[in-house]
Amino acid sequence: MIQRRVRTFLERMIKQKRVPVSLLFYGKEGVGKGNVAFEFAKALLCLNNLYPPCGNCSSCSHMDAFKKEPEENLAYYGEDKRGRKVFMYLQGEHPDFIYVKPDRSEIKIDQIRGVKEFVYLRPALSRKKVVLIEPADSMNPFSQNALLKVLEEPPEDTHFVLVSHNIDKVLPTIRSRSFLLEFPPLSLEEIKSLTGIDDPFILEFSGGSVNMALKLYEDREILEVALDILSGDILRLYRRSFEIEKWDYDRQALLLRLLEILLHRKVIEGKEEHRQALDRVVWGMEFLNRGIRLSILIFYVGLIGGEKDVLHKG
C-alpha cells in the first residue's frame, strides 16, 4: 500500500534527522494524505522523536486530544489590519502546533499573517513547531505569496506540512521550496480493503479515493444522476440540470467531482471532444462557491460531453 511506503520513507527521514523545512503531500482527495500528514506532524513534535509517534508523551497526548475536539473549540481568532475579528487557524492544547484550514472556501492572507506570528515564537513543549496547511491549494494568491516570504527565510525550529488535492494550484515557487511526496490513487483492492465496499460499480468510479467511494456508497442516487447527464438523452439532461439547483453545496461538489472522473476517462481513451466538457466541469468545481448557475453549466456539459456509452454498468 502506498501509505506504507510513504511512512517508511518518512520514518527514515526522521531517524536521519533530515526533515526539510517544508513538505508538500499531494494527490487526489481521499487517498490518505491528510491522515499521514497529521501523523507525521505528531511525530515531529513527539518528545521521544519517534515515527510512528510514541503516543504516550505529553506532546502525543495533546495531538490525540486535538483530533477528538470539535473544531469550534479549537478555532483561534485574531484581528485584521482594520481591527476586525477574523478566523486564523485551529489550535488545541499543544502550544507548538497549528492547523490552517480554509475560512469558508479559501485560506486568506490574514490567516497566513497569523501563521507568521506563530512561527517566530520559540517552541514551548516540543523541540520543534509544526504548521499543517490543508488543503494548501485553497490559499488565494495573496496568502500564497505571504507564505512564500516565510519559506524564503524560514525559522530553524518550524516545519511546514502542506497537503494539496490539486498541486497545479500551488505556486511553483512554493513547490520548489518544498519536498514533494506524491500519493497516487489507491487500487480497487486497497479501497475495498479499507472501506469494506465490494460494489464493483462504486469501486470503479471512486477514482482511487476512499472518500469518493464512501460518499458514493452513501448516495448511490448521484451515480444515476451522472448517468442521466452524460447519457445523451436531452430530456433527462434537462430535468437533472434543474433538479441539482436544489441540492446543497457538498452534494453539488460531489457530482462535479464524479463527472470529472468520468469525462477524464473518456479523454484518456482518446475522445478529445470530451476535453471541452471536462474543462468546463473543472471550472465549475473552482467557482461553485461563488454563486454560478449550475443548471446552465450542467446542461452545457451534458450537451457536449454526453453520449450513450459514457457510463455503462455492464
Image (cartoon, rainbow, N blue to C red):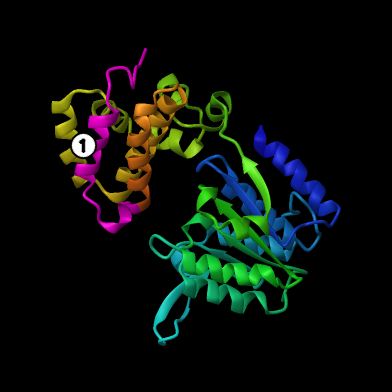
Taking the image as drawn, is residue 75 in sight? no
In this orientation, which residue lies closer to the viewer: 137 or 88?
Answer: 137
Residue farthest to the right?
16
Say whether residue 57 is left or right of residue 36.
right
Q: Which quadrant holds residue 94?
A: bottom right
Residue farthest to the bottom?
83
Quadrant of image for the C terminus:
top left
| Residue drawn at point x = 23 percent, y = 37 percent | 300
| Residue drawn at point x = 70 percent, y = 72 percent | 153
Count of numbered marks: 1
Say whether residue 148 is left or right of residue 29.
right
Residue 272 in the image, given as x and y percentages of width and height: 39, 27
Q: Amino acid at mark 1?
A: Phe
To which residue does mark 1 refer?
Answer: 299
Residue 121 in the image, given as x and y percentages of width and height: 68, 79
**84 above or below 47?**
below
Say whether residue 220 is left or right of residue 79.
left
Residue 203 among those drawn in magenta: no
The region drawn magenta spans 287-314
Residue 168 in the image, given as x and y percentages of width and height: 52, 49
| Residue drawn at point x = 66 percent, y = 56 percent | 176
Residue farthest to the top?
314
**79 above or below 243?**
below
**181 above or below 189?**
below
Quadrant of image for the N terminus:
top right
